[in-house]
Image: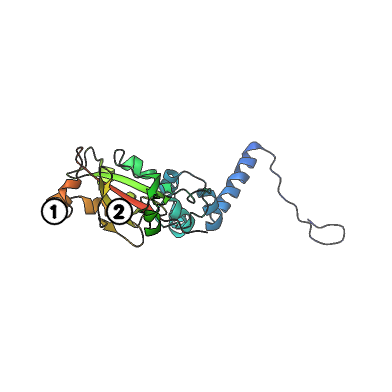
């Protein structure tokens, strides 16, 4: 339609019915979800499990989740050494984040994060004056796993390509785990991974370790589990 001065007048479509309004809203949502950057902003606010299963929606969703460092960190599939985006903590720094998805896969063997007080040995000066050694605080991750076999393991957990196998125990990832029994920790780490230990690596190392004699059986507790503990290092921001 031409205006009085001969220019083309542009009119914006205004929906007149609920059906048209719903169509326009759906169209706008589809446009947003086609943009990986905007889709990432939407998905990052979802619970961990919802992000994981959102990859079934379409190839675009799957590609967005796999290509986003924010979403990979949220799924514990990429390390978050500085805990970016997580709430702060005063002492001894930001609290590491538990991987709650592992609670669904391994209800009885779920890694937990706790604040511990470390008593250091007294220095020569402290010893001479009769003072105790200094104390410090740190974040530790603890996890137990059967020395024999996993009981009541669902087929989904046993699937070789299951996502939990690539997930870290916590954020930031723990790089080493020590065997522990009755508060006595092994001298050397039972596992070391510079880039962080995944649940799959823990399971693979643990299964068969008793028969192979990889670790001393005195570390098997009365409940038949190996108990591991490791310190989590949060890189200061």
Could you tell me which residue is drawn at 64 percent across and 37 percent down?
Answer: 18
Label 2, secondary structure: give it: strand
Q: Which residue is mark 2?
A: 177
Q: Which residue is mark 1?
A: 213
Position in image of residue 55 (x %, y %) = 42, 50
Residue 220: quarter of image: top left
Could you tell me which residue is drawn at 22 percent across and 54 percent down?
Answer: 205
Q: Nearer the viewer, residue 165 or 197?
A: 197
Q: CA distance from mark 2 to mark 1?
A: 18 Å
Q: Nearer the viewer, residue 23 or 8?
A: 23
Position in image of residue 185 (x %, y %) = 27, 50
Position in image of residue 62 (x %, y %) = 43, 54
Label 1, secondary structure: give it: loop
Q: Nearer the viewer, residue 34 or 225?
A: 225
Position in image of residue 101 (x %, y %) = 38, 44
* Residue 72 falls left or right of residue 23: left
């Amino acid at each position: 339609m031409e205006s009085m001065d001969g220019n083309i007048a542009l009119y914006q479509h205004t929906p007149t019915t609920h059906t048209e309004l719903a169509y326009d809203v759906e169209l706008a949502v589809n446009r947003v979800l086609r943009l990986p950057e905007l889709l990432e902003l939407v998905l990052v606010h979802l619970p961990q499990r919802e992000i994981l299963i959102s990859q079934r929606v379409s190839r675009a969703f799957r590609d967005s989740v796999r290509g986003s460092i924010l979403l990979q960190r949220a799924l514990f599939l990429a390390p978050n050494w500085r805990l970016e985006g997580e709430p702060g903590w005063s002492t001894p720094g930001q609290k590491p984040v538990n991987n709650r998805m592992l609670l669904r896969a391994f209800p009885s063997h779920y890694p937990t994060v706790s604040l511990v007080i470390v008593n250091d040995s007294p220095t020569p000066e402290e010893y001479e004056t009769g003072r105790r050694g200094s104390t410090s605080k740190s974040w530790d991750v603890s996890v137990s796993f059967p020395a024999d076999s996993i009981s009541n393991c669902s087929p989904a957990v046993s699937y070789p390509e299951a996502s939990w196998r690539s997930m870290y125990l916590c954020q930031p990832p723990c790089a080493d785990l020590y065997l522990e029994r009755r508060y006595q920790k092994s001298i050397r780490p039972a596992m070391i991974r510079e880039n962080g230990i995944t649940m799959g690596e823990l399971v693979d190392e643990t299964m068969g370790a008793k028969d192979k004699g990889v670790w001393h059986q005195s570390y098997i507790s009365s409940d038949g589990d190996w108990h591991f503990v490791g310190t989590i290092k949060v890189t200061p921001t």
